Image (cartoon, grey):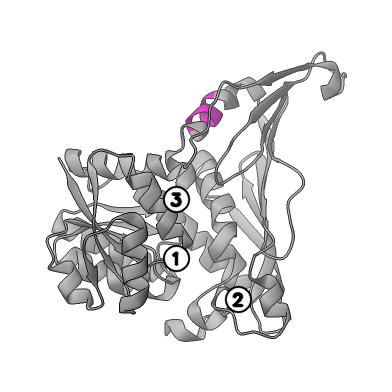
Amino acid sequence: MNLNIGIIGTNFISSDFCEAAASVSEAELYAVYSRKQETGDRFAKKHGIPRVYTDYDAFLDSGLNAVYVASPNFVHCEQTLKALRRGKHVLCEKVMAVNDTQVQSMINCARENGLILLEAMRPDFDPAYDLIEQTLPRLGRLSRATFEFCQYSSRYDRFLSGETVNAFNPELCNAAVMDIGVYCIHSLVRLFGMPEQIKAFSTKLSNGFEGSGTVLMQYDGMTAEAIYSKTAVSVTPSVIQGEKGSLLIDYVSRPETLELRLRKGSRDPLSGGSTEMLPYTPADNNMIYEIREFIRLIKNKEVNHKYLQYSLDTIRIIDEVRRQNGIVFPGANEK
């Protein structure tokens, strides 16, 4: 099958998606929707997309059968629901929507219409996470997992200089937990499920935007923590610890190296044990995996796939993080 994909959004993540899609034989970049004709034309020319629309209804009626939603968070739900009701499969960028209510409404709509809805959460589909899951038994009984994603935003200096920057604007339903913290939380959910208890801490900038945070997630017998920031850079890998050793992951969102360190003897430090680099070769652009899985789900008509629960559990945790730390999105019309 050939999947005619319409692109919503013309930012850098949309460009990454188009580059990945170009290497998937069954994916065709069919059209792009942009609020501004000039922006859409420039994006279409860059990626060889033959159709540009500034009217969303015309875009949906153009002959495409799936859409990739990479617009700002606060319009994900509205655009996704409209596409689903017009019979289009939807691959929606993370976070899927602003809150649990919106995500549930999107999932219900997809099920009612027999269509595929999938959150474009890279770690879910990267083979590195299958390898991580397969390796966990070698660690013995797990005690702790620390997933860290701290990335100094390329737009933070502009914010500090006094410029109004969309990426740091809570009015647009933005927060560090929505942007990069979600990678840590979602990946922990994928590996360990929904936690029993959640305790969250946030640091806010001068305009109320959450710039960084830490989320503690308590499971039966183990603790997980998600550490994230848009105002600092990570210098340590993420790690999963067990009684027999630890697994180190360099990048949560796109792993490149997976290092297994096993303890030797009952009292020896890790340095006295063994170190093993797990056999993994990363893709140049790991978005290719989500596109392939999206197409597979459509082919097999797997409307009720496992990834929906990951997305729902993740947004429920984020809702609790926001509640505990007073992270409010004025433009979301939340009750």
Out of 189 and 248, give the one closest to the viewer. Answer: 248
User: Disc 2 marks which amino acid?
Assistant: Phe
* 128 in magenta: no
| Side of 13 relative to 28 (left or right) | right
| Side of 193 relative to 234 (left or right) | left
Numbered tag placed on residue 76 in the rendering: none
In this picture, is 197 found above or below 132? below
In this picture, is 157 found above or below 227? below
Residue underneath mark 3: 121
Residue underneath mark 1: 11
User: Disc 3 marks which amino acid?
Assistant: Met
**CA–CA distance between discs 1 and 3?**
17 Å
Q: Residue at x 26, y 58 (%)?
A: 49
Q: Residues within 10 Å of mark 1 (few under 14, many from 20)?
A: few
Q: Is residue 303 at least partly visible in the picture? A: yes
Precedes in sequence: disc 1 or disc 3: 1
Precedes in sequence: disc 3 or disc 2: 3
Q: Residue at x 45, y 62 (%)?
A: 95
User: Disc 1 marks which amino acid?
Assistant: Asn
Q: Residues within 10 Å of mark 3 (few under 14, many from 20)?
A: many
Quadrant containing the C terminus is: bottom left
Circle 2 SS class: helix
In this picture, is 256 found above or below 181? above
| Bounds of the magenta segment | 130-134
Rendering coords of residue 308 (x, y %): 35, 51
Check the image and name the residue furthest to the top. 265
Q: Quadrant of residue 33?
A: bottom left
Residue underneath mark 2: 168
| Mark 1 vs mark 3: in front | 1
Quadrant containing the N terminus is: top left
**CA–CA distance between discs 3 and 2?**
21 Å
Q: Residue at x 71, y 41 (%)?
A: 237
